[in-house]
Image (tube, rainbow, N blue to C red):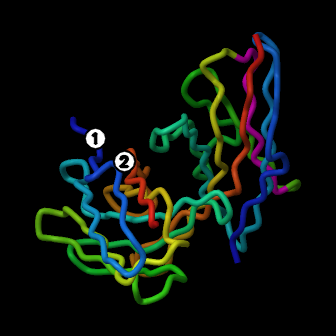
C-alpha cells in the first residue's frame, strides 16, 4: 500500500538560510510524488511533481526536490528561505487504479515551516 | 482561466442537521475529488467523480455522499451532522487521474 511520512511536524529557519523538509514514501511501484503548500486560510498550491522523468525536480518559488529510490525519499529543499515561505507543506503520493478507474492523493501529515527574520 | 471555486466559504450548523457544499471545477476538467482536512486526521480522501460517475470513495460513513452534474460541477452532502464533521472540506479538479489536481480554497464547516 502507498503511504507518505513527513519526518518533521515543524521546521524553523532564519530568513536567508536553507530549507529542508523531509519526506519518505512507501509504494509498491514507481510513484507519482508531489509537494503542495498551504498558506493560512488558503487552498493547496502545487509546488512541484515527480512523475519518473528527471530525479531532480524544480518547482515554483525556488523550491526543488530530489527523488531517491534507494532511500525512498523525496525531500524538499530551497537554498534561501524567504518570509513568504512560512506555510504548511504536504508531501503527497498519487494512487491510480487500473483501467482508468480513477485514483486519489495520499497526503503526509504536513510540516509547518516557520521563517524567522 | 478561472480557478476552482467552492461555496459557501464558511458554514455553521448544529448537530443532526445536513449540509450541502458546492464545487465548480476549472473549465474542461472532468475529474473532481473531495478531501476533508482536520487537525487530528490531516487530509483524507472522500470521493472522486468523473463524468458524473463516482469512481472511488474513501473510508467515510454513508452520511457523506456526493454527486456530479453534466457540467462537471460537484456537490457533497453530509447528513446527520456530528461534532467530528467540523473540518475544512477541499475540492480539487483535474483533467483525469495522473494530471495535476487544482484545489479550491475550501469550505470551513463548523458543527455546534
Query: In the image, which disc is placed on residue B104?
Result: 2
Query: In the image, which disc is placed on residue A6?
Result: none
Magenta stretch containing residue A76, yes or no? yes
* Residue in the foreground of this view, choosing between B54 and B20: B20
Range of the magenta residues?
A: A72-81
Vertically, is B16 above or below B84? below
Vertically, is B97 above or below A34? below
Vertically, is A2 above or below A117? below
Decide: few, some or many residues near mark 2? Use Cα within 10 Å; few <14, some 14-19, many ≥20: many
Where is residue B98? Give x, y as percent.
46, 60
Tell me the element at label 2.
loop
Q: Chain of mark 1?
A: B
Closer to the chain start, of discs 2 and 1, is 1
Where is residue B74? Give x, y as percent.
24, 66
Where is residue B67? Give x, y as percent.
24, 76
Vertically, is B91 above or below A79? below
Residue drawn at x 74%, y 21% is: A115
Tell me the element at label 1.
loop
Q: Chain of mark 2?
A: B
Q: Is residue A86 left or right of residue A69?
A: left
Residues tagged 2 and 1 counted as in contact (Cβ below 8 A): yes
Amino acid at each position: 500500500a502507498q503511504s507518505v511520512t513527513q519526518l518533521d511536524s515543524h521546521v524553523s529557519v532564519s530568513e536567508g538560510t536553507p530549507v529542508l523538509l523531509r519526506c519518505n514514501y512507501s509504494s509498491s511501484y514507481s510513484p507519482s510524488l508531489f509537494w503542495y503548500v498551504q498558506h493560512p486560510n488558503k487552498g493547496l498550491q502545487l509546488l512541484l511533481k515527480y512523475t519518473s522523468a528527471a530525479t531532480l525536480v524544480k518547482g515554483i518559488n525556488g523550491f526543488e526536490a530530489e527523488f531517491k529510490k534507494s532511500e525512498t525519499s523525496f525531500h524538499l529543499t530551497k537554498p534561501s528561505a524567504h518570509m513568504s515561505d512560512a506555510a504548511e507543506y504536504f508531501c503527497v503520493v498519487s494512487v491510480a487504479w487500473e483501467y482508468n478507474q480513477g485514483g486519489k492523493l495520499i497526503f503526509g501529515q504536513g510540516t509547518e515551516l516557520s521563517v524567522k527574520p | 482561466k478561472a480557478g476552482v471555486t467552492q461555496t459557501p466559504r464558511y458554514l455553521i450548523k448544529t448537530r443532526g442537521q445536513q449540509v450541502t457544499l458546492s464545487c465548480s471545477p476549472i473549465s474542461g476538467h472532468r475529474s473532481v475529488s473531495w478531501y476533508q482536512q482536520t487537525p487530528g486526521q490531516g487530509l483524507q480522501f472522500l470521493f472522486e467523480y468523473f463524468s458524473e460517475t463516482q469512481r472511488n470513495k474513501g473510508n467515510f460513513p454513508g452520511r457523506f455522499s456526493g454527486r456530479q452534474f453534466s457540467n462537471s460541477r460537484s456537490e457533497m452532502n453530509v447528513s446527520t451532522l456530528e461534532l467530528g464533521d467540523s473540518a475544512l472540506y477541499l475540492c480539487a479538479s483535474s483533467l483525469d487521474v495522473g494530471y495535476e489536481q487544482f484545489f479550491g480554497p475550501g469550505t470551513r464547516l463548523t458543527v455546534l
